Each structure stands twice: as structure tokens, then as C-alpha cells.
Image (cartoon, rainbow, N blue to C red):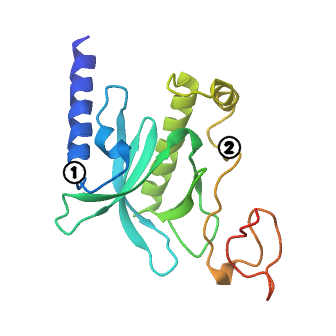
Amino acid sequence: DIDATILAKLNFEKLMAIQSSFVSLVSDPIVHRIATMERVFLREGQLTKVCRKQHKPFTFWLFSDCLMYATALPSGVKFKFNRSMELRSVTAVAHTATSVSNAFDILGAEKSFVVIAKSAEDCEQWIEAISSAKAALLSAGDSASSSTATTASAATDSSSELPTASAPVWVADSQADGCGLCGARFTFLSRKHHCRKC
């Protein structure tokens, strides 16, 4: 099919452009293998990550198999790689705290955090795009995965369900009175930070 060939070519060119936009000092192997015939580019945009001292802007890329984010360098056309998250272990849900608007949680097995979109519409679109991409990946049975049992059980459920073991989201001291994982109350001796025992 000619249309499919053209779309595949355009997708590969976009992946190559993203791959070439990263500075060469990056050690993560995925940065050097962004452009593959199996990967599909889905969405790109700037989101502000909620951090301890100050919120930081990052450029995010959503692909058919992973979510990646990076810091834009002063030139605005090159990026410093920060992290890639395997999409099958990522869930995006609306942020429940009212202190931040247009925010959603990105929950992953290794790292979870809150990001702020530029508008409520953009926030909803990101959540939907991540959820849809994850559902498509799980239903396709991703042949690259070695854990077919996990894929089969996850594919039977909706993409809106939280991952079984996601990393805790950082919470400001003023908003945390207990551990988000085990429920232990914070006291003078049990400090207000992520509970390292969980």
C-alpha cells in the first residue's frame, strides 16, 4: 500500500530527526536507537515537571513503546537526555491535588512524578494519548517482551488501571502527613520523605 509506505517513511524521518537532536554525550543506549522500523512517533510537547526546589520544563516524546523526556539546551534545537520509560509500565492519571492546575501524574515502575500541561485540554490529550498507546501496545502482545504472562494479564485490563508496583510520587512536606505506599504516619522520628522501607 503506497499510503502506508509514505507514512512509514515520514515516521522514520521524524524518529531520525529526534535521534539526531540529542547531544552525543548521552550514555543511554536508547538514544542511539530511537529510529527503528518498529517504533512509531505519537506525540511531542513541553511539560513542566514538579520538582522539589522549582518546577522544570522538559520536552516529552511519546512513542508506541516508550515515553522519553529531555532538557532543551540553550540553542533550543538540541537536547540533553533525561529518561526513557517503558510504556507498558507507565500510567497517566489526573493529578488529584487542587494546588496545581492542568497537572497529571506519570506513574512508572522506576520513577513517578507530576507534570503540568499548558492547558486543561493539553493535559487531557496527554493522558488519553499515553493511555491509548499503552493499551495498543499491550493488546498487540509486543513480541519483544519476554514476559508474555504479564502482557496477557495486563492486556485483559483497561489501560487506566495503575501499575501494580509504581514508584511513589514526590510530595511536598506541607502536603504529606504519611507514607503514600504503606500508610505509616510521619512523626518527629519518622521524617517526611519517601518511606525507604516500602
Gap in angstroms between the C-alphas marked 1 and 2: 34 Å
Count of labels in the image: 2
Identify the residue shown where x is 52% and y is 25%: 142
Q: Is residue 109 left or right of residue 59?
A: right
| Camera-nearest residue between 22 and 49 | 22
Question: On the image, numbered disc 2 is attached to which residue?
Answer: 161
Quarter of the picture holding the C terminus: bottom right
Q: Residues within 10 Å of mark 1 (few under 14, many from 20)?
A: some
From the viewer's perspective, is residue 40 above or below residue 114? above
| Badge 1 vs badge 2, beta-carbon distance below 8 Å | no
Q: Residues within 10 Å of mark 2 (few under 14, many from 20)?
A: few
Q: Is residue 174 left or right of residue 29?
A: right
Amino acid at pointer 1: Ser
Q: Is residue 66 left or right of residue 106?
A: left
At which x and y percent is residue 190? 79, 81
Amino acid at pointer 2: Glu
In the rendered image, the residue lying farthest to the left is 75
Identify the residue shown where x is 22% and y is 38%: 16
Q: Secondary structure at mark 1?
A: loop
Quarter of the picture holding the N terminus: top left
Q: Earlier in the sequence, mark 1 or mark 2?
A: 1
From the viewer's perspective, is residue 142 above or below residue 126? above
At which x and y percent is residue 115? 49, 63
Determine which of the numbered discs, if any, sits on residue 21 in the image: 1
Q: Nearer the viewer, mark 1 or mark 2?
A: 1
Identify the residue shown where x is 31% and y is 26%: 37
